[in-house]
Image: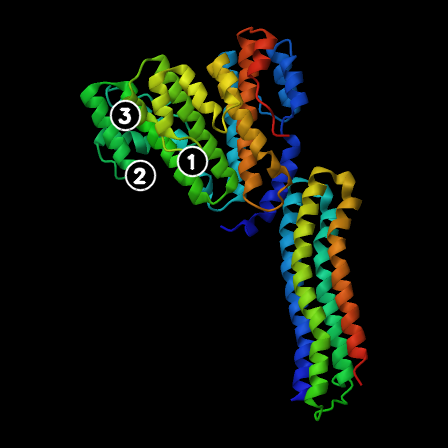
Amino acid sequence: MGIALALLGAASAALFAGIGSAIGVGRAGQAAAGLVTEDPTQFSRALILQLLPGTQGIYGLLIAFIALSNIGLLGGTVDTGMSVGTGLMYLFACLPMAFVGLVSAMQQSKASVASIGLVAKRPDQFGKSMIFPAMVETYAILALLVSILAINGIK
Amino acid sequence: MTDNQYYYAVARIRSRELSLLNQSFIDQLLGAKSMDEAMRLLQDKGWHMPDEYTTESDRVEKMLSVEKKKTWDLIGELVDDMSVFDVLLIENDYHNLKAAVKEALTSDIHMDIFSGGGTIEPRVMEEAVKTRDFSPLPDEMEPVAEKALETLLHTHDGQLTDVIIDKAALIAIGKAAKKSGSPVLELYAGLKVASADIKIAIRAVKTGKDKNFIREALAPCDTLNTERLAEACGEGMDAIYDYLSLTEYSDAVPELKKSPSAFERWCDNLIIRNIRSEITHPYTLGPLAAYIIARENEISTVRIVLSGLINDLPEQSVRERAREMYV
């Protein structure tokens, strides 16, 4: 039971953060395609803004890897007799990345879409336009740190 | 269609907004000394230049109709379900209905009296009226067409027929706006209906119509009490001004006192000022609707400026009629 809970935590981190990023990158991609349809020279700028909500998926994957590694699943030393308490600790350690990853990726995509609109109007303001969605990234990074610290703290 | 589905469309519109005419361009256009100079300025902005034309007016109308078509072609590319924009097109349908009903009194066919850009093909409307089979028309237009035709055939009163159709058009615009779920379109429809009611009231007083006629003509409006407006009509022009001073259209009173065209300009400017916030909305239907309204507004302003040049009107008098721009 303990190992199942730990696996659930690892899977949640990859799953929810990945879902958020998929939605976010897709949403920003639609806006990017709209901009490039009108002005193909904006491709690289639009691409960078589209990719910003994709980082949460990578963070989720990282947490899942760290959790799986700590559990011993990747090295083949899995502890099938893990206690429910330890399993729950892994599960809760992964949840910050899972939930913050999901929500922040979706919110960041909205900021990216708005920034793509900004670039459409003022291509010279690309630098500033990146800052707005990047601010949302802060919270995904905080969740990533909490999840890493929590997983590494489990004995 | 939910607002979430307009990311692509709004990004394209954001780019297109760069080529909308701004106030300084309109000032430049107003300063043009000749038609050729004005047309050159518009050509530099990417506006269509017709190769063949009979008169200068024909040249202008051909250019403007292509520009109008360009707008709707773009929106057609961006939106799968164009019915959300019915609110902007219904007016043309009811204009065509008026034309078809009046044409029914004569045996001739005058396709040139119909305007394009509606939701129903003018030919369908013409055929429906001619055969008295109104079933091809939308449900809400069917009884209106029948009533208008009956009225015209029995009374030969073109004005009464216009009143029936105009009121139905305003009601249909209001309904279509509510159906679209877009705050911009609802705002547009609300202002359209209110301004039409005010114009009806003013015209009714000037032509000495009775209260019953006015009550029949006024369309239900969320921002005006049509009963009070009809009462005011019975008391005269000052009573209308007094009533309007108590409403959100109080700023319209000085314009109404100036001239009908000053009031028209005020109405158009009010719509543009109210939709201008859409420039910052990133992914709703609003920016698309605002873009269409802005394009229609610049097309009508260009028409005013070029007509002024064709008719050799003083720049100041044309400037007073030019509308505010969206960007």
| Residue at image coords 30%, 37% | B137
Question: Disc 3 designates what residue?
Answer: B101
- What residue would you read off at disc 2? B140
Give the chain of mark 2: B
Quote the CA–CA distance across marks 2 and 1: 20 Å
Q: Quadrant of residue B270?
A: top right
Does residue B230 appear in the picture of this structure? Answer: yes
Q: Which is nearer the eye, A47 or A13?
A: A13
Q: Are marks 3 and 1 on the same chain?
A: yes
Q: Amino acid at mark 1?
A: Asp
Question: What residue lies at 68% left-to-right and 78% top-to-bottom?
Answer: A9
Q: Residue A1's quadrant in the figure?
A: bottom right
Crowd tier of the residue under label 2, counting other residues whose Cα lies within 10 Å: few below 14, some 14–19, many 20 or above: few
The chain identifier of the residue carrying mark 1 reads: B
Can you identify the residue that label 1 sits on? B222
Q: Please state which amino acid type lies under the numbered disc 3.
A: Val
Between disc 2 and disc 3, the foreground one is 2
Q: CA distance from mark 3 to mark 1?
A: 30 Å
Q: Nearer the viewer, mark 3 or mark 1?
A: 1
The percent coordinates of residue B28 (x first, y second) are: 67, 17
